């Protein structure tokens, strides 16, 4: 079994409901158990700003799925939630990003681990800090230390 960290986001439909449903679905994946979940956060849109605010969260999984098998499962859950990839950084019913898998460094056409842009995004690090503040990031820093350097203005803890 391996620890994996997944970011969850939604800003269409019923975002809180979709995030909580996705957490339950992640816990039901074969060979996978949800160990920790963050609080839910309302965050301003990133990239394309003319869209509703997001609800974001993060989870820690214990899984025996390979990183690519876990990615496939995440993509299937997004599709089940009605995710349509029509616009980069656009609105979405469900977004599941594989952030980190303990002991795994990958850079292939389908998957880069650790996630190459997670340290730039408060909407990722804020919930990740709830469950893994000392998780190392590239650049010899941790989630907690990097989050302290980011602008979290407009981010609100929901539950």
Image (cartoon, grey):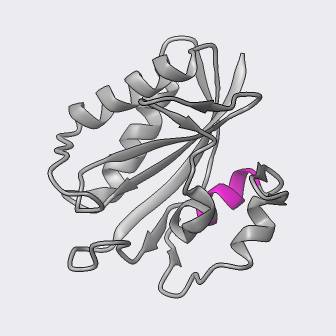
- Above or below residue 34? Residue 114 is below
Q: Nearer the viewer, residue 112 or 34?
A: 112
Q: Main secondary structure of the magenta part?
A: helix
Q: Quadrant of residue 81?
A: top left
The residue positioned 23% from the left and 33% from the top of the image is 79
Q: Nearer the viewer, residue 95 or 104?
A: 104
Q: Nearer the viewer, residue 117 or 11?
A: 117
Horizontal side of 17 relative to 135 (left or right) equals left
Q: Quadrant of residue 51?
A: bottom left
The residue positioned 51% from the left and 78% from the top of the image is 156
Q: Quadrant of the N terminus?
A: top right
- Above or below residue 10? Residue 98 is above
Count of numbered badges drawn on the protein: 0
In percent of width and height, residue 82 lies at 17, 40
Residue 5 inside the magenta-drawn segment: no
Q: Quadrant of residue 92?
A: bottom left
Q: Nearer the viewer, residue 50 or 18?
A: 50
Residue 128 inside the magenta-drawn segment: yes
The residue positioned 74% from the left and 77% from the top of the image is 148
Which residue range is magenta in the image? 126-132
The residue positioned 48% from the left and 32% from the top of the image is 111
In percent of width and height, residue 100 lies at 64, 39
In percent of width and height, residue 47 lies at 34, 72
In percent of width and height, residue 37 lies at 60, 46
- Above or below residue 102? Residue 64 is above
């Amino acid at each position: 079994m391996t620890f994996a960290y997944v970011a969850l986001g939604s800003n269409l439909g019923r975002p809180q409901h979709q995030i909580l449903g996705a957490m339950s679905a992640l816990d039901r994946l074969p060979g996978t158990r949800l160990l920790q979940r963050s609080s839910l956060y309302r965050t301003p849109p990133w990239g394309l700003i003319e869209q509703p605010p997001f609800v974001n969260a993060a989870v820690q999984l214990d899984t025996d799925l390979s990183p690519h098998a876990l990615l496939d499962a995440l993509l299937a859950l997004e599709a089940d939630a009605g995710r349509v990839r029509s616009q980069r950084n656009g609105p979405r019913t469900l977004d599941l990003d594989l952030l980190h898998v303990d002991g795994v460094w990958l850079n292939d056409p389908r998957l880069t681990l650790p996630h190459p842009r997670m340290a730039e995004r408060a909407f990722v690090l804020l919930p990740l800090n709830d469950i893994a503040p000392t998780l190392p990031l590239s650049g010899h820093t941790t989630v907690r230390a990097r989050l302290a350097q980011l602008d979290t203005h407009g981010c609100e803890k929901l539950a």
